[in-house]
Image (spheres, rainbow, N blue to C red):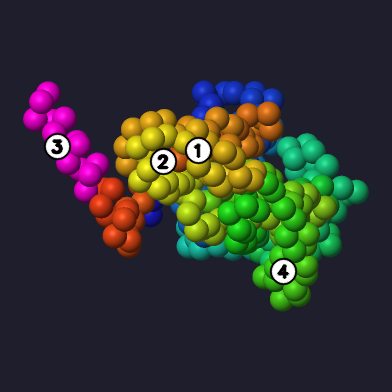
Amino acid sequence: MAVKRDYYEVLGLTKGADGAAVKKAYRKLAKKYHPDMNPDNEEAEKKFKEVTEAYNILSDPEKKKLYDQFGHAAFDETGAGGGAYGDPYGGTYRQAYGGPGSGYREYHFEGSNMDDMFNDIFGDIFKHGRTQGFGKGGFQNSGFSGGAYSGFHSGFGGEDFRAKGSDLHAEVTVGFDEAAFGCDKVIRIQDPGSGAVQSLKVHIPAGIDSGKSVRLRGKGMPGTNGGENGDLLLKVRVSGKSGYERKGMDVYTTVNIPFTTAVFGGEAVVSTLYGNVLCKIKEGTQSGSKIRLRGKGIVSMKDPSVHGDQYVTVQIEVPRYLDPAAKQKLKEFEAACAGKARTA
């Protein structure tokens, strides 16, 4: 049989600590290891039982006095407590947690009001001298006095023990322009509990990028015992737009210009998210050159007065078909360029 740890050690206290220190230590540890906070965690459940056992002894002046004098033997059937005091607690306390022939037994509290203890430790969780559903099969509709403890299962569950509901997750796809300028979308989500489907109108903020999420507060799972609802986290997928590429708040596009415009300079019409603009093309512009259009990118989600830029890559169009006269002129141009190169 495993050796029991010292009760003071279990609560992180020095031997002889007073009732206030015992209560404070238990409050902290009980909340830390409670099964509701640690679902399916057997180790946490064991620690919860251990700290509760320690508290039940050290918070009771008479039991604490016996423990300080005889240690764990005060509550063993054949130990000092049994010999000197005739097992003063009728063996019921000794059997509650891992005593001889242990296992997890029913726990009868005779002569001590455990309602008062839990009202003291957890505030108003247990109101009006009663508890409500302290775990499945637990303290159903009665106080602890004379009641039976059938085991820790599902948590405190009292009227005032409120917990926020779980968050839900969903996805929505929006167009490139919808993400750039913001939009409203109607989505349909299914309640995982009831299976009911509901429609929600969601505002997608301007400037949102693919992979970002919109939080809809209170649209998640219901809270426990009046606790606030969880949230719905809506992950946004932004579809592409032909001719446009987004990198952060900046937008990248291309513009095709005639060969002669590249040679002599001129103007070119460039499409932006905000309409067409007329850009000046410098004489001798090379293919692959970039034009920067300030403020023609995506708006910042944090500051609507701030925009990214648009970078336009220039592509020079090579004529596919030329009439004989045009070809002759182009050959004359080629010869002139070659002659200039020889004399340079």
Mark nearer the N terminus (2 vs 1): 2
**Contact, mark 1 vs mark 3 (Cβ under 8 Å):** no
Disc 3, SS: helix
In this view of the protein, can residue 257 be seen by the observer? yes
Measured Cα–Cα span from mark 4 to mark 1:
48 Å
Q: Are marks 2 and 1 in contact (CB under 8 Å)?
A: yes
Q: Amino acid at mark 1?
A: Glu
Tag 1 secondary structure:
strand
- Between 21 and 214, which is closer to the camera in this rendering? 214
Residue furthest to the right in view is 128
Q: Find disc 2 in the rendering and name its residue.
A: 261
Mark 1 lies on residue: 267
Q: Which residue is mark 4?
A: 188
**Amino acid type at mark 3:** Ala
Label 4 residue SS: strand
Q: Indicate which disc, 3 or 2, sits on the residue closer to the N terminus.
A: 2
**Gap in Å between the C-alphas at discs 3 and 2?**
21 Å
Q: Nearer the viewer, residue 53 or 90?
A: 53
* Amino acid under disc 2: Thr
Vertical comparison of 178 with 138: above or below: above
Single out the residue that lies furthest toward the bottom.
Answer: 195
Query: Mark 4 near mark 3, Cβ–Cβ under 8 Å?
Result: no
Could you say which quadrant of the image residue 301 lies in?
Answer: top right
Mark pair 4, 3: CA separation:
69 Å
Q: Nearer the viewer, mark 2 or mark 4?
A: 2
Badge number at residue 338? 3
Alpha carbon separation for disc pair 2 and 4: 52 Å
Most common secondary structure along the magenta stretch: helix
